[in-house]
Amino acid sequence: MKLTGNTIFITGGGSGIGRELAEALHRRGNKVIISGRRRGHLDEVVAANPGMTAVELDVADATSIKKVAAQLIADYPGLNVLINNAGIMLPDQAGAHIDDALMVSTITTNLMGPIRMTSALIDHLKTKNDAVVAYTSSVLAFVPLAVTAVYSSTKAALHSYILSQRFMLRDTKVRVLEIAPPWVRTDLMNSREAEQAMPLEAFIDETMTVLATDVDEVLVEGAKPFRENPGPGEHAFVNGLNAQMMEVLGG
């Protein structure tokens, strides 16, 4: 991916990976527009990064996506990069009753949201040079975390969709990238102080280095064992990971 001279829209840019990625790309001389549901978070990021702009967006709301997409195309005709980063992660009980509201919210936000957002902008992006659609998935797309079964399933589904979209866009100007983070110190699942999680700054630094290459899957070193797992031996890896995490989480 070309890392300078782009006009980039990042969903979920008010905190965590989205904010740090937005700031890293902003420092590289890109025009960066972030979005999120919480105006206060967006204003804080913009104030700390002169030249960055923000727009309120609820990726779980199809009407909000349609409205923001039209606004982006009108206000930023040079837009050539979309990074679908917004997502939610909540614990669930795959071995018991699943809360229906949690399930619907997670699927709508993590899967339907990025599909809708890309769909709303894809015709515009096809007209741009150096166009990119990127998705923040997770290593849990490849190795599910049992205590967040719905979240893990949405990321697995998103990975599958990315593979299909990359194939369908193979003869266009649009590249389709997947960023699959390992466990990173963010607010998701109260992981900011988790010793086992990768420091956010280190994750962003390594991710930016990989983004500068021509790979389709953006994986830091800590993510690679998870990506390599699917296959005949996947159950042993999945069971081992989840046994370890149950001890860490006190389950």
Image (cartoon, rainbow, N blue to C red):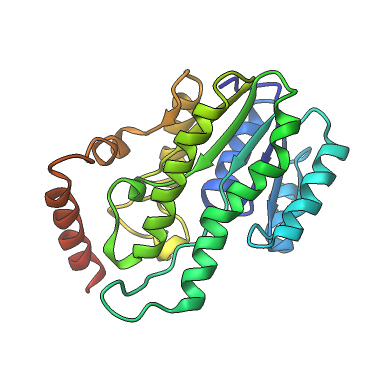
**Quadrant that contains the C terminus:** bottom left
Quarter of image, res 29? top right
Provide residue 13's location: percent of width, then percent of height: 63, 49
Relative depth, front residue between 14 and 192: 14
Residue 128 left/right relative to 244? right
Question: At 15% across and 62% down in the image, what residue appears?
Answer: 243
Provide residue 55's location: percent of width, then percent of height: 77, 52
Q: Is residue 223 above or below residue 127?
A: below
Q: Is residue 244 above or below residue 93?
A: above
Q: Residue furthest right?
A: 74
Q: How many marks?
A: 0
Q: Is residue 38 above or below residue 6?
A: below
Provide residue 149's location: percent of width, then percent of height: 34, 63
Residue 55 left/right relative to 138? right
In this rendering, does residue 10 appear at all? no
**Quadrant that contains the N terminus:** top right
In this rendering, does residue 228 appear at all? yes
Provide residue 51's location: percent of width, then percent of height: 78, 37
Question: At 73% across and 22% down in the image, what residue appears?
Answer: 128
Question: At 48% across and 42% down in the image, what residue appears?
Answer: 161
